[in-house]
Amino acid sequence: MGKYVSKTCLNFTEKKGLKPNISISWDDAKPTKTHMAIAKLVTEDKVKFVISQNIDGLHLRSGIPRSNLAELHGNMFVDECSVCKNMFVRSSAASTVGRKLSDMPCKSINRRPCRKGKLRDFVLDWEDELPDEDLTLSHAHSTLSELSIVIGSTLQIIPAGNMPTYCKKSSGKLVIINLQATKHDKKADLIIRNYADQVFELLFEKLGYDVPEYSDELDPVKLLKNETIAVIDWTQSATLAKEWEKKSSKLESELRQQRKLQKLLKLKEPKKELLDETKKDEDKPLEQEKNIVKSEVDETKNDDLKVEEENGYENGEENNGQSLSEPPTKVLKTE
């Protein structure tokens, strides 16, 4: 598949990689058309897994199930218990970052409550380790993916920035949808320089889908705020993470074996230089034989010449007045 770069509809500010001058609170922000389109593709089983570096919680609010979503850098609308590590959706955005403890007790349901557990925000700071289950699932799905699609990222932050390229190890395809260039553009099979909303509008038109409208009635944050639901568990499944890790480990093992086999086969193949040397060695006897034959022919000619000299031109006698030491003169006969 050749690379295609669409350069239509570029906003100057975003094209330069600058932040647009928009001021809106975390609580008032709503999922975009792209968020809702991705959620629809997950529902239709077209998208298996979503890896997010955003902390805005918009994927959660769009309706993507936790089992299909990794939030590597956290979520403003999620709290985590400091003891049992279970997570719970918040009714409003956290006022702190860096996993700061609050006075709120753990909200564990359907299991024994933590007596000493306190809730803390789930917004990672630079020195914080990435959440284990989210990281494991992200690595596994990236490795097993047949198609990885990057949306709105320059892929600078690692490890998330490198994960879309993992599919290339097993002949997967990489598509990048971003207004600016990314560090992995050279590895991409398709690059689209356009707004994600417009791209998904065209995609859904081809698929025959309608992009769902955002609804407060389906937003977990709004449901908690309206006290429609008391508690929403947002804990990532450790069991699910182990299952996917096992699948990806198996594939990685197979790929390693393939690379080893290819390396062995390459080592067993004779190098071009050795082939050339072998060919030269094989040609040497033929050349020597030719030289011997040529030498014998030359000696035979010399012997014949000596016989002629002895028979007709001894001691410099002239033949028709011509010395043997001189070349024979062409004689033209005239009548």
Image: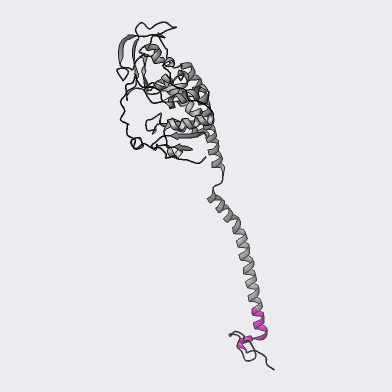
Task: Confirm whether residue 312 shows in the render.
Answer: yes
**Quadrant in which residue 100 is drawn:** top left
Residue 142 on the magenta segment: no
**Quadrant in which residue 327 is drawn:** bottom right
Query: How far across and down, in percent of the image, does residue 317 sit?
Result: 62, 89
**Residue with the most extreme right position:** 335
Give the colouring mode of the picture.
Answer: one colour
Total marks placed: 0
Q: Nearer the viewer, residue 72 or 201?
A: 201
Query: How far across and down, in percent of the image, does residue 296 sit?
Result: 64, 69
Task: Confirm whether residue 87 shows in the render.
Answer: no
Which quadrant, please, contains the C terminus? bottom right
Query: How far across and down, in percent of the image, does residue 78 sit?
Result: 37, 16
The boundaries of the magenta stretch are: 305-328
Q: Tell me which residue sits at (43%, 38%) in the image.
A: 185
Query: How far across and down, in percent of the image, does residue 243 sit?
Result: 51, 20
Q: Nearer the viewer, residue 264 or 325?
A: 264
Residue 310 on the magenta segment: yes
Q: Nearer the viewer, residue 65 or 224?
A: 224
Q: Tell me which residue sits at (30%, 12%) in the image.
A: 102
Determine whether 328 is above or below 58 in the image: below
Q: In the visual, does 311 lie left or right of 253?
A: right
Q: In the visual, does 117 lie left or right of 240?
A: left
Q: In the visual, does 142 lie left or right of 102?
A: right
Q: In the visual, does 55 lie left or right of 291?
A: left
